[in-house]
Image (cartoon, grey):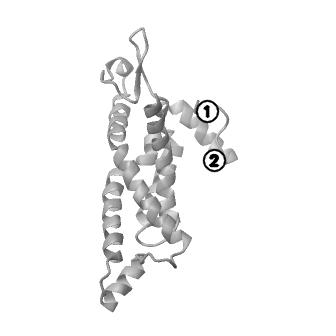
């Protein structure tokens, strides 16, 4: 039970971490994370589909891995040519030192955290995408995969129901409250 709560928390925190990567230190390197977050929020608000927040998760996972590699290579104790230094600084790379400012540290920590969390919930996102694509039919609840899924609960009667993350009504209410009041109402996600 605790594992499922941790996975739900990871799914809920991942979009927040993505936006932190995008805005903590604005640069060309972090721009795709910011754009992905904006597109995801618009998709979520228009469709009330939680998967909208993860619209570009596959390309962003590859890009996050590439960004981590670039940051790591730039930290190596190598003297780079001045032209390469200029390009690296222009796109937003920087050397981490004892003089690094808080946004730079937050940017790198959130980038690594984003990649790790996304790697941990990757299978769940694929499964959520599969389930949401099957929900076109009324018979889908009965035909959902029988494996012990994080997103599917089976009642004693044998009827299968999807997890709270896949229920549109909950997220429609959350979205309305979030954009109207700036915070979710009490008990929406419980």
Q: In the rendering, at what x and y percent does residue 63 appear?
A: 33, 61
Residue depicted at x 64% and y 31%:
187
Secondary element under disc 2, as helix, strand or loop, is: helix
Is residue 68 positioned above or below 115 on the image?
below
| Badge 2 density bin: few <14, some 14–19, many ≥20, Cα 10 Å | few
Q: Position of residue 44 (x, y in %)?
A: 50, 44
x then y, percent, for residue 179:
63, 47
Residue closest to the far top: 157
Q: Is residue 136 visible?
A: yes
In the drawing, does residue 145 fall left or right of residue 37?
left
Please state the horizontal and vertical placement of residue 59, each as a whole percent of the image.
32, 56
Give neighbour class at mark 1: few <14, some 14-19, many 20+ (Cα, 10 Å).
few
Q: Nearer the viewer, mark 1 or mark 2?
A: 1
The residue at the point 52 percent across, 79 percent down is 99
Q: Earlier in the sequence, mark 1 or mark 2?
A: 2
Please say if 180 is above or below 168: below
- Quadrant location of the C terminus in the rendered image: top right
Quarter of the image for residue 76 reads bottom left
> In this figure, which residue is indicated by the disc labeled 1?
188
In the image, is residue 91 above or below residue 47? below
Label annotation for residue 90: none
Q: Which residue is mark 2?
A: 179
Q: Would you place residue 38 above or below residue 89 in this image?
A: above
Q: Is residue 56 visible?
A: no
Report, in whole angstroms, how far the alpha carbon at label 1 lies from the one at label 2. 14 Å
> Which residue is outermost to the right?
181
Residue 151's image quarter?
top left
Tag 1's secondary structure?
A: loop
């Amino acid at each position: 039970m605790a594992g499922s709560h941790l996975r739900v928390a990871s799914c809920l925190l991942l979009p927040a971490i993505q936006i932190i990567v995008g805005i903590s230190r604005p640069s060309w390197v972090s721009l795709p994370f910011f754009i992905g977050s904006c597109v995801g929020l618009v998709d979520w608000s228009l469709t009330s589909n939680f998967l909208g927040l993860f619209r570009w998760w596959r390309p962003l996972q590859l890009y996050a891995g590439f960004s981590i590699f670039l940051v790591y290579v730039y930290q190596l104790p190598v003297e780079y040519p001045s032209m390469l230094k200029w390009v690296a600084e222009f796109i937003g790379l920087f050397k981490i030192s004892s003089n690094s400012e808080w946004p730079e540290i937050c940017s790198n920590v959130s980038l690594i955290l984003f990649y790790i969390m996304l790697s941990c919930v990757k299978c769940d996102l694929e499964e959520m995408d599969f389930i949401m694509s099957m929900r076109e039919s009324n018979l889908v609840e009965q035909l959902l995969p029988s494996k012990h899924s994080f997103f599917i609960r089976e009642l004693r009667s044998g009827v299968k129901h999807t997890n709270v993350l896949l229920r549109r009504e909950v997220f429609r209410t959350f979205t309305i409250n979030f954009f109207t009041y700036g915070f979710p109402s009490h008990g929406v996600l419980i």
